[in-house]
Image (cartoon, helix red, strand yellow):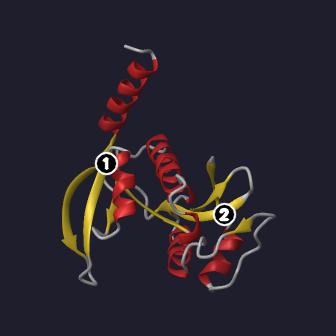
């Protein structure tokens, strides 16, 4: 399956922040595929504070052929010392189809194109599917900690140098060397 990202329009973010369904713009939507209200609220607050939309907008993850929204993803903030954090979620009905992997790959491309030098994903160690996604894409476990709610999270990081190495390996494999 092929997936792509669509930046969620601000009017949809306002609806989501108010816990109402947005205009789906001709797309169908899986159950629990839309971002939670607090994600939309955070994006709107950052936009109002002048953070570039590039870094605070949330994206629909869309299955390309059927125009079906299967999840959402985005950056949690603008880069800080070159580092940006990502978040993503997939409808339970649409998991194990490559959507999360495609979304994180797209976020990596956007992050580096926008000038970030490192991307971080914080994953609950019990979330084995998300752990597999970041491991598959080459993120490195940089340690764990307890957040404000005392939830243990593992920090997974991917930096610009790792991207260059992955591209070099991919290039060599593609040419049979």
Coordinates of residue 84 in the picture (x, y in percent): 38, 55
Q: Tag on residue 69?
A: 2
Compared across the picture, whether 141 is left or right of 47 comes to left
Task: Residue at 31%, 48% (x, y): give it.
Answer: 139
Judge the density around disc 2: few (<14), some (14-19), many (≥20) Cα neighbours within 10 Å.
Answer: many
Coordinates of residue 70 in the picture (x, y in percent): 61, 64
- Give the distance between the C-alpha atoms of the residues marked 2 and 1, in whole angstroms: 26 Å
Coordinates of residue 92 in the picture (x, y in percent): 53, 71
The answer to whether 20 is drawn above or below residue 129 in the figure is: below
Task: Residue at 33%, 65% (x, y): give it.
Answer: 123
Looking at the rendered structure, the number of numbered marks drawn on it comes to 2
Task: Residue at 41%, 27% (x, y): give it.
Answer: 170
Image marks 2 and 1: residues in contact by CB distance under 8 Å: no
Element on which disc 2 rests: strand
The answer to whether 22 is drawn above or below residue 1 in the figure is: below
Frontmost residue, 150 versus 131: 131
Element on which disc 1 rests: loop
Q: Tag on residue 1?
A: none
Coordinates of residue 61 in the picture (x, y in percent): 60, 58
Image quarter of residue 23: bottom right
Work out which quarter of the rendered image holds the C terminus and state it.
top left
Residue that label 1 marks: 139
Judge the density around disc 1: few (<14), some (14-19), many (≥20) Cα neighbours within 10 Å.
Answer: many
Residue 79 appearing in the image: yes
The answer to whether 137 is drawn above or below residue 76 in the figure is: above
Compared across the picture, whether 75 is left or right of 117 comes to right
């Amino acid at each position: 399956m092929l997936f792509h990202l669509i930046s969620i329009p601000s009017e949809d973010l306002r609806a989501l922040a108010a816990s109402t369904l947005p205009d789906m713009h001709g797309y169908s939507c899986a159950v629990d595929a839309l971002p939670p209200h607090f994600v939309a609220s955070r994006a709107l607050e950052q936009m109002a504070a002048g953070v570039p939309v590039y870094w605070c907008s949330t994206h629909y993850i869309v299955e390309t052929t059927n125009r079906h929204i299967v999840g959402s993803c985005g950056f949690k903030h603008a880069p800080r010392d070159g580092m940006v954090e990502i978040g993503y979620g997939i409808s339970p009905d649409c998991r194990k189809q490559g959507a999360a992997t495609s979304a994180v790959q797209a976020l990596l491309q956007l992050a580096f194109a926008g000038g970030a030098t490192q991307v971080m994903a914080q994953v609950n160690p019990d979330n084995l599917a998300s752990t597999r996604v970041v491991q598959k894409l080459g993120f490195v476990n940089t340690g764990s900690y307890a957040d404000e709610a005392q939830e243990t999270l593992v920090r997974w990081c991917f930096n610009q140098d790792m991207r260059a190495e992955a591209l070099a390996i991919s290039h060599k494999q593609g040419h049979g060397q």
